[in-house]
Image (spheres, rainbow, N blue to C red):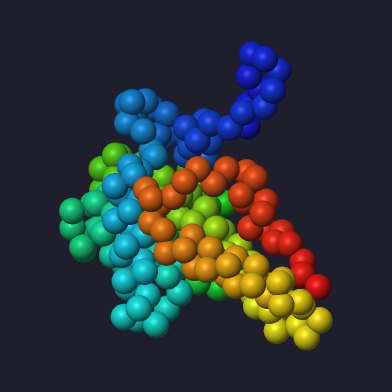
C-alpha cells in the first residue's frame, strides 16, 4: 500500500515486488512482473486440464505450470522451479489456498538462479496471480455450498428455489470462465461471492 497525492491509499504490485524481493529492483524496471492475459489463460487451462487427468485440485500448481504459462521454455526448468517453491513452502497443497506468497523471501533470486531474471519475475507474478485465483475458486465453492444448503432447506419457498437455481448456474458459469473472458468483477462482486444472500 502507498499514499496517493490525493491522500487516499493505493496498491502497487511492482512496489510489493520490490519490497518482497529487493534484488529485482536492481534489474530493468520495465521488465514487469505481471504475467500477460495470454499467460493467465494458458496457466488456467493447464491447471484445469491437469486436475482432470490427475484427480488433484485445479488450484494446486504442478511441475509444468510455469512451462504451460510460457514463463520458461524447458519442462526441466519448470520442474526445478516447482521443486524449489515446494521446498520453501510457497507451494503447499496443505495450505488453505495451496499457495502462500508470504513465504517468498529475498533469497528467491538465488534459489531460482538457473533461470533468467525475467523468468524469476514472471514466476513471482504467476504466484501472486494464482493465489488470487485460488481465493476466487474457494469463494465460489463456498457460495455454491451455501446455495445448495438453502435449496435443500424444507422452509425455502418455490420462488426462492427458482432464484437459487439461477444463482447456481451463475456460479458454474463464473467458475468456467478463463481469466480473459471475465467481466470486471471488482470489489463488489468479490464481496458478493464471500457473502452470498441467505434464503428462507
Q: What quarter of the picture does the N terminus occupy?
A: top right
Q: Position of residue 159 (x, y in %)?
A: 71, 72
Residue 11 visible in image: yes
- At x 73% / y 62%, what residue is drawn? 197
In this picture, residue 107 sits left or right of residue 9: left
Residue in front for this viewpoint, 193 or 155: 155
Residue 80 visible in image: no
- At x 60% / y 72%, what residue is drawn? 165
Q: Kindly indicate the quadrant of the structure image that contains residue 87.
A: bottom left
Q: Residue furthest top?
A: 5
Residue in front for this viewpoint, 131 or 178: 178
- At x 44% / y 50%, what residue is drawn? 182
In this picture, residue 73 sits left or right of residue 22: left
Q: Position of residue 167 (x, y in %)?
A: 60, 65
Q: Residue furthest left?
A: 73
Q: Position of residue 143 (x, y in %)?
A: 64, 67
- At x 69% / y 23%, what residue is drawn? 8
Vertical order, 50 against 113 (above or below): below
Vertical order, 45 against 29 (above or below): below
In this picture, residue 166 sits left or right of residue 158: left
Callout count: 0
Q: Kindly indicate the quadrant of the structure image that contains residue 23.
A: top left
Q: What quarter of the picture does the C terminus occupy?
A: bottom right
Q: Kindly indicate the quadrant of the structure image that contains residue 29.
A: top left
Q: Position of residue 107 (x, y in %)?
A: 45, 47
Amino acid at each position: 500500500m502507498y499514499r496517493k497525492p490525493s491522500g487516499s491509499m493505493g496498491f502497487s504490485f511492482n512496489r510489493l515486488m520490490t519490497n518482497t524481493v529487493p534484488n529485482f529492483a536492481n534489474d530493468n524496471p520495465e521488465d514487469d512482473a505481471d504475467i500477460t492475459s495470454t499467460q493467465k489463460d494458458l496457466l488456467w487451462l493447464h491447471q484445469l486440464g491437469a486436475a482432470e487427468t490427475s484427480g488433484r485440485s485445479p488450484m494446486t500448481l504442478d511441475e509444468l505450470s510455469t512451462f504451460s504459462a510460457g514463463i520458461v521454455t524447458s519442462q526441466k526448468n519448470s520442474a526445478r522451479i516447482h521443486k524449489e517453491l515446494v521446498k520453501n513452502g510457497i507451494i503447499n497443497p496443505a495450505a488453505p489456498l495451496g499457495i502462500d506468497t508470504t513465504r517468498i523471501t529475498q533469497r528467491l533470486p538465488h534459489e531460482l538462479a538457473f533461470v533468467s531474471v525475467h523468468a524469476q519475475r514472471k514466476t513471482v507474478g504467476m504466484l501472486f496471480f494464482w493465489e488470487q485465483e485460488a481465493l476466487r475458486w474457494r469463494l465460489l465453492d463456498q457460495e455454491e455450498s451455501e446455495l445448495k444448503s438453502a435449496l435443500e432447506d424444507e422452509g425455502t419457498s418455490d420462488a426462492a428455489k427458482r432464484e437459487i437455481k439461477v444463482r447456481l448456474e451463475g456460479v458454474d458459469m463464473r467458475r468456467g470462465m478463463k481469466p480473459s473472458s471475465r467481466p470486471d468483477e471488482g470489489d463488489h462482486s468479490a464481496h458478493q461471492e464471500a457473502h452470498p444472500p441467505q434464503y428462507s
